[in-house]
C-alpha cells in the first residue's frame, strides 16, 4: 500500500520556446504564483489544472491591519480604564453623585461603541472587496 503513495519520478522532458512578450507574461505569472524558482512545477500545475494560489501583497491592506491592531489595543486600554473609573466612582463619590458620573461614562461608552461599529463595518467592506479580488 505504501508503494501506491510514493511519488512517481518524472522521466519525460519537454521543451518549448517563447517570444519576448510571452516570456515577460510567463515570468509575471511565475512571480504571482510564488513559484519563480520551480518553473517545471508551475507548468505541470497549469497543464493539469492543479490548484495553485496567487498571493498578492497590498501595502495599504497591511497599513490598515496595523491601524486596526492599534485601535484594538486602545480599546483594551479604554476597557481597563473604564474598570478603574467605575471602581474609583464607587469608592470616592457619594451615592447621589454616582448616577451623574456613571451617566457621563455611559455616554462616552456609547460614542466608543458607535466608533467600534463603524470600524467593524469598514473591515467587513474591506474583507468583501478583498475576497472578490482574490477570486
Image: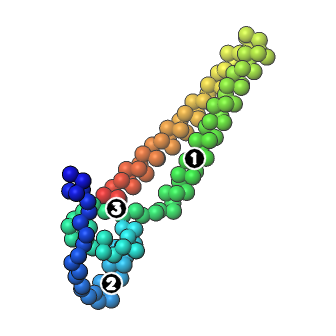
Q: Quadrant of the C terminus?
A: bottom left
| Residue 122 pos. (x, y %) | 46, 47
Residue 83 drawn above or below residue 77: above
Q: Which residue corresponds to the image point at 62% horizontal and 25% vertical from the top-left? A: 106
Residue 91 drawn above or below residue 121: above
Q: Label 2: how many residues lie within 10 Å, few (<14), some (14-19) or many (20+)?
A: few
Q: Label 3: how many residues lie within 10 Å, few (<14), some (14-19) or many (20+)?
A: few
| Residue 78 pos. (x, y %) | 65, 34
Which secondary structure, mark 2?
A: helix
Which secondary structure, mark 3?
A: loop
For marks 1 and 3, the one nearer the N-term is 3
Distance (Cα) linking label 1 and label 2? 41 Å
Q: Which residue corresponds to the image point at 30% horizontal and 75% vertical from the top-left? A: 40
Q: Is residue 40 left or right of residue 59?
A: left
Q: Which residue corresponds to the image point at 35% horizontal and 59% vertical from the top-left? A: 133
Q: Which residue is mark 2?
A: 23
Distance (Cα) linking label 1 and label 3? 27 Å
| Residue 84 pos. (x, y %) | 71, 25
Q: Which residue is mark 3?
A: 53
For marks 1 and 2, the one nearer the N-term is 2
Q: Nearer the viewer, mark 1 or mark 2?
A: 2
**Circle 1/circle 3 CB separation < 8 Å:** no
For marks 3 and 2, the one nearer the N-term is 2
Amino acid at each position: 500500500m505504501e508503494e501506491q503513495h510514493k511519488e512517481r519520478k518524472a522521466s519525460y522532458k519537454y521543451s518549448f520556446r517563447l517570444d519576448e512578450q510571452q516570456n515577460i507574461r510567463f515570468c509575471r505569472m511565475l512571480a504571482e504564483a510564488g513559484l519563480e524558482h520551480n518553473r517545471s512545477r508551475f507548468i505541470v500545475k497549469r497543464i493539469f489544472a492543479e490548484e495553485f494560489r496567487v498571493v498578492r501583497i497590498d501595502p495599504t491592506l497591511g497599513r490598515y491591519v496595523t491601524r486596526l491592531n492599534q485601535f484594538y489595543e486602545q480599546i483594551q486600554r479604554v476597557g481597563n480604564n473604564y474598570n478603574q473609573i467605575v471602581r474609583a466612582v464607587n469608592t470616592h463619590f457619594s451615592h447621589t453623585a454616582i448616577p451623574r458620573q456613571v451617566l457621563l461614562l455611559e455616554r462616552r461608552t456609547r460614542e466608543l461603541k458607535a466608533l467600534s461599529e463603524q470600524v467593524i463595518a469598514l473591515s467587513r467592506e474591506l474583507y468583501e472587496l478583498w475576497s472578490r479580488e482574490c477570486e
